């Protein structure tokens, strides 16, 4: 693959280009413009439309440095239609000399920028300009404006990209008749047009990225992503995995002991998981379902299948409170059936931790815990199934580490990842193409819908009375403290202050407090008291976001709701509505609201379906932030749009499978063109 030095890049410039991800000639070819400027035509000063970028050619009439109201370089220029003023608030002495020389020798200025109406008539502030001879020709294509970085000018980028287009292999890697059938330009046509569009090109379509040339580039980008993910999927399936073919005995006992029947969605997901576990290839399945859809019981039954087959299962959760909820629930379900459940977390005392590690390495059937499960000192006797809850909160390296723990003794374990953040279909097709997905799309019977109320902070007194009313009716309530991203200390102080204020405002009621800095046993004791009904109002930080299940709690107040993301608001709201009583979630917000905060609160108020909330969240945030691009290891799409270009994602999925099956060499060349060394990111 030709390196970037091939187009005359110095070591100093190479370092700067590296900040833009430009390391090879191919990277320059697919470094496409943000927008375009039209320098192919001239506009007369008298015809310039205010606020619109135009190109003017004019003679210099006068040059002066003025000191009021501030120091500035001012030049008067004119063409055949009228005069205009140029203002430069930041300038060098050489600019003054240059403009004066142009006035003296009669050379023209070619100016590009917006014209506005000033006190003395039309003016341009800091226009881009250059001196030209009287007969200088105009460019024949629109001028591209590229993503840039400090020390790399637009002019440098244009020259480098023009050289790269001359040296790079732009040969077509897809079947030309197939491209024509689907209305796609050839790759060479597309990139050449996008880097140097002719004046006749539809500038609106270019700016909006709806031009057919953009469509081809978007398709190729999505195809590279699909190819890399499908390759990762195939590479995993090429490895062996333990065949977890149990006799069904433990599963039948657990199903018989549960106080509720499984939903049709749970049964369907279990069937898909069970089929995967009996194959000698590693399962890589994402189990996604809305808050309260019953993912834990599906995970428990999957773990039972591994245990029946003589293997261990491990469940890792991102927070101690969530891991502990899982541990208590799973132990209550499984220990009566003779299943040994171990608990492993970082806050355990040294002796307890060593005992748990020993248990995991010997007789434990199911190990539940946090990041402590992947520490170097932890070994597993025969890990057959790794379950990761809230998988998007773990980095690639952490997910891989749990898999490696199983590989030490034998084959890599099967992996089941769970997420209560529903993933919109287009995002699942694009960013999770290397996973099999099971969806729990129905709630168990008996779950009551939660009503959402938006209340201004000015009406806080009414909310306090609402809490008193709920407690008087025999219910319980949560009060969630404001989210403070910057400081854990500040977050703790806010929780303590909120608890003190509410204890005064709700005098006579039992007000508890739980936050992330509490020791595990203190946290567990408080949660147990709340679950037992000995605490009326639980003041909490977002540690209760997932995994907390208290059916008698029917009211939740989220303070400063405008600070929370949609996913968090939806998760928190899911802590109520878990019993038979009508439940309410009050979103207490403070004015003034930003546009984004207003949009978020409107979405959460109008929707209860997690998938619809996730779809709108994706539109608000974009895919990179939604999937956590730094953690997922998946390159964020630069050009394609998941909503607008959903049809291209479908097309690219089909083409990826075809290329890998029928033309693997062309698939490799396509990946090299688009991703280069970044393909390594996708192997997790």
Image (cartoon, rainbow, N blue to C red):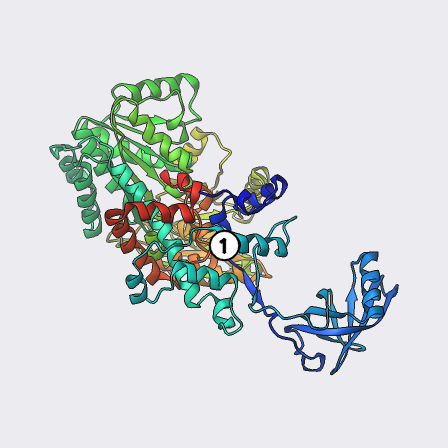
The quadrant in which residue 131 appears is bottom right
Quadrant placement of the C terminus: top left
The residue at the point 40 percent across, 58 percent down is 187
On the image, numbered disc 1 is attached to which residue? Answer: 166
Report the number of discs: 1
Farthest-out residue, right: 67
The quadrant in which residue 497 appears is top right
Is residue 481 in view?
A: yes
Q: Secondary structure at mark 1?
A: helix
As drawn, is 495 to the left or to the right of 353?
right
| Front-lying residue, 408 or 105 | 105
The residue at the point 35 percent across, 47 percent down is 420
Is residue 534 in view?
A: no
Vertical comparison of 83 with 454: above or below: below
| Front-lying residue, 468 or 135 | 135
The residue at the point 54 percent across, 53 percent down is 163
> Looking at the picture, how far across and down is residue 343, in whole percent?
34, 27
> Looking at the picture, how far across and down is residue 556, in whole percent?
43, 52
Vertical comparison of 246 with 583: above or below: above
The residue at the point 51 percent across, 34 percent down is 517
Quadrant placement of the N terminus: top left
Vertical comparison of 286 with 186: above or below: above
Q: Residues within 10 Å of mark 1 (few under 14, many from 20)?
A: few
The quadrant in which residue 589 appears is bottom right
> Looking at the picture, how far across and down is residue 154, in whole percent?
62, 56
């Amino acid at each position: 693959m030709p390196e970037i030095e091939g187009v005359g890049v110095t070591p100093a410039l190479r370092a700067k280009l590296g900040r833009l991800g430009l390391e090879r000639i191919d990277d320059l070819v697919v470094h496409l413009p943000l927008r375009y400027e039209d320098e192919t035509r001239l506009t007369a000063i008298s015809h310039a439309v205010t606020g619109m970028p135009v190109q003017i050619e004019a003679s210099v009439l006068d040059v002066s440095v003025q000191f009021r109201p501030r120091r500035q370089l001012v030049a008067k220029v004119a063409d055949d239609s009228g005069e205009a003023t140029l203002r430069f608030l930041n300038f060098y002495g050489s600019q003054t000399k240059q403009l004066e020389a142009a006035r003296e020798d009669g050379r023209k200025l070619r100016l590009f920028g917006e014209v506005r109406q000033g006190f003395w008539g039309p003016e341009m502030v800091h226009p881009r300009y250059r001196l030209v001879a009287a007969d200088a020709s105009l460019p024949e294509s629109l001028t591209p404006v590229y993503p840039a970085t400090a020390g790399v000018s637009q002019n440098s980028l244009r020259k480098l990209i023009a050289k790269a287009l001359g040296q790079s292999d732009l040969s077509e890697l897809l079947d030309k008749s197939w491209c024509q059938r689907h209305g796609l330009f050839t790759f060479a046509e597309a990139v050449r047009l996008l880097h140097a569009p002719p004046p006749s090109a539809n500038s609106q379509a270019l700016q909006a990225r709806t031009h057919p040339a953009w469509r081809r580039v978007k398709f190729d980008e999505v195809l590279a992503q699909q190819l890399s993910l499908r390759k990762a999927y195939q590479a995993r399936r090429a490895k062996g995995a333990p065949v977890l073919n149990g006799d069904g005995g433990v599963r039948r006992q657990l199903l018989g002991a549960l106080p509720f029947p499984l939903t049709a969605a749970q049964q369907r997901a279990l069937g898909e998981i069970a089929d995967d576990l009996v194959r000698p290839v590693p399962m890589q399945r994402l189990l996604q379902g809305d808050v309260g859809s019953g993912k834990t019981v599906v995970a428990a039954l999957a773990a039972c299948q591994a245990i029946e087959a003589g293997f261990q299962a491990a469940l890792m959760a991102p927070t101690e409170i969530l891991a502990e909820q899982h541990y208590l629930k799973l132990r209550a379900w499984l220990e009566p059936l003779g299943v040994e459940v171990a608990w492993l977390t970082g806050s355990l005392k040294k002796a307890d931790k060593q005992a748990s590690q020993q248990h995991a390495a010997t007789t434990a059937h199911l190990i539940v815990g946090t990041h402590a499960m992947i520490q170097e000192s932890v070994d597993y006797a025969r890990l057959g199934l790794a379950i990761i809850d809230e998988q998007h909160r773990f980095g690639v390296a952490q997910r891989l580490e749990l898999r490696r723990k199983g590989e030490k003794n034998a084959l890599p374990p099967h992996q089941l990842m769970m997420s209560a953040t529903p993933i919109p279909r287009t995002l699942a097709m694009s960013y999770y193409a290397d996973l099999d997905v099971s969806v729990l799309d129905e709630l168990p019977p008996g779950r009551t819908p939660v009503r959402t109320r938006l209340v201004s902070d000015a009406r806080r007194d009414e909310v306090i009375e609402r809490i008193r009313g709920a407690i008087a009716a025999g219910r319980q309530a949560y009060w969630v403290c404001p989210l403070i991203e910057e400081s854990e200390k500040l977050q703790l102080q806010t929780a303590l202050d909120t608890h003190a204020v509410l204890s005064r405002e709700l005098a006579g009621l039992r007000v508890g407090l739980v936050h992330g800095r509490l020791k595990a046993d203190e946290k567990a004791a408080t949660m147990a008291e709340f679950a037992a009904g000995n605490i009326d109002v639980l003041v909490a930080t977002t540690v209760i976001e997932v995994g907390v299940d208290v059916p008698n709690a029917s009211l939740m107040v989220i303070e400063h709701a405008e600070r929370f993301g949609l996913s968090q608001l939806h998760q928190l709201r899911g802590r109520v509505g878990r019993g038979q009583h009508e439940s309410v979630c009050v979103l207490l917000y403070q004015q003034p609201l930003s546009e984004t905060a207003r949009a978020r609160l409107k979405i959460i108020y109008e929707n209860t379906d997690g998938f619809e909330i996730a779809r709108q969240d994706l539109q608000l945030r974009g895919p990179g932030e939604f999937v956590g691009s730094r953690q997922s290891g998946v390159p964020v799409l630069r050009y394609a749009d998941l909503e607008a270009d959903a049809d291209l994602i479908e097309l690219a999925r089909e083409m990826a499978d075809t290329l890998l099956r029928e033309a693997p060499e062309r698939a490799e060349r396509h990946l090299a063109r688009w991703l280069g060394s970044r393909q390594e990111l996708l192997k997790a």
